[in-house]
Image (cartoon, grey):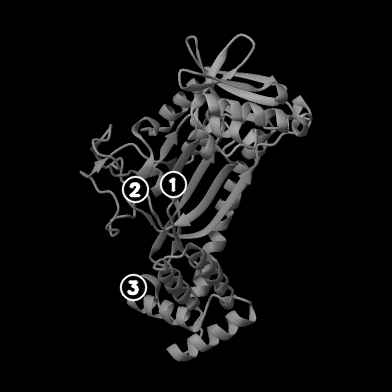
Amino acid sequence: MSKNLYQASHQWATRPDDERFENVQGMHQACLAYAKSARTATVPFESLRVEADDGEIYLTGKSNRAKFSHYAFGQICKSSSSPAEFVRALPATLASQVINNRLKNVSDTMEKYDSRLLFHTDNDNMLCRAITSELYDRTWNHDIIRLGIFPMLEDGWRVPPARPALMNQKGVRKATIDDILPNQGDFGLSVKVGDDIAPAGLYASDHDMFAFLVNVDTPVSIGDRALMRGMFVRNSEVGDGCLIINWFFMDNVCGNHICWGVTDHKEIRVKHIAGEGKQDQGQTLNRALDRFEIECRKQEAAQGELEHKFSLAKKYQIAATKTETIEAVFKYAKSKGLLSLTKNVLTAGYDMCEDHKDWYGSPRSAFGLVSGITEYSQSIPYAGARHAIDAHAGKLMEIAF
């Protein structure tokens, strides 16, 4: 029923200083600057060539050339069916010969579509940021922020505070009352007034963006719990994945941006694919904004339904004793094909809930047992097994309806 999400915490732990932003406005300006300095070109695939010069590899054109970003070099290797890891280890001259030779050999299969190139310009220098087909529909990060995220700030969404993640991280300051999220007082890992905080939750680079926002203005009340709304937005301008939006409710978020007690987690993916014609370019952004609006309405409507379901699940007592509860649930899980819910898992979940009665309530209730199972699953080191237990445990809630 509930689980923890670590995507935002991974971003918090790994992003360098120059990819972190204090606020949405600053991230938007940086992404807009990338777009303004960009140049694009559409060329026949068979005309792509590279050359080596002084240990560097360049994409060459009729009158100029461009260095590769790390990601774009991987794309030219993929386009030429050359293993990127192998090619990167070669001397530049040999690597360029390998790529050019492979490009000639595979060009016949790519004749249907031209290549779409994205460059970053700085004075007279050019950097190739992306090599995609002409069917790739680029959605600029600054447009996602301007049209998707800015309106949400007006509806109470905000970036949660985070502790410094790096040694000598830039922008470290003391948290004020304005930084603190409400309803986090009893959560020991939350940021408190006076704690050191630093830019986090908003990240952008030359190939992607990630934004983590929460909304505490309209919590879902589950007994004495107040679930806040959370959201991740991920996008790439260079073909490194879909535009992805995650929506969820959660108990708390800690200073490391781990999302605790997540429930009703949904993910939507919008592929960067256009139709055959040039008029179809830009449709990815339109589809994404439509999904933004639809999912916002769905999540708002889900609050009342979620509160009702939690209420039923907390009231519903599966059986009178521990043994009878585990036997009844095991029989139910087996009939529904929830095979990861073995008697050992159910017993561990029951005991976990028993240890956290003040939080989850009775382990003989549907809500309590499911909460205990998903809490127990966090101790399992294998992601596949952990995810299977979480997914099957969520379906156990239906026993109360």
Along the line of sight, the residue nearer the viewer: 194 or 164: 164
The residue beneath circle 2 is 181
Asked if labels 3 and 2 touch by Cβ distance under 8 angstroms, the answer is: no
- Secondary structure at badge 3 equals helix
Labels 3 and 1: the sequence-earlier one: 1
Distance from Cα at disc 2 to Cα at disc 1: 9 Å
Taking 335 as reference, is 322 left or right? left
Asked if labels 1 and 2 touch by Cβ distance under 8 angstroms, the answer is: yes
Please state the horizontal and vertical placement of residue 237, each as a whole percent of the image.
57, 31
Instruction: Say which quarter of the image contains residue 158.
Output: top left
Along the line of sight, the residue nearer the viewer: 296 or 146: 146
Distance from Cα at disc 3 to Cα at disc 1: 25 Å
Task: Determine the residue positioned at 58% across, 79% down.
Answer: 333
The vertical placement of 296 against 263, above or below, is above
Picture quarter with the C terminus: bottom right
Q: Is residue 321 visible?
A: no
The vertical placement of 65 against 281, above or below, is above
Q: What label sits on residue 214 in the rendered view?
A: 1
Q: Residues within 10 Å of mark 2 (few under 14, many from 20)?
A: many
Taking 340 as reference, is 166 left or right? left
The residue beneath circle 3 is 358
Q: Amino acid at mark 3?
A: Asp
Please state the horizontal and vertical placement of residue 143, each as a whole percent of the image.
56, 29
Q: How many marks?
A: 3
The vertical placement of 57 against 308, above or below, is above
Please state the horizontal and vertical placement of residue 36, each as a whole percent of the image.
53, 18
Labels 2 and 3: the sequence-earlier one: 2
Please state the horizontal and vertical placement of residue 259, each as a whole percent of the image.
41, 54
Q: Amino acid at mark 1?
A: Val
Q: Is residue 298 visible?
A: yes
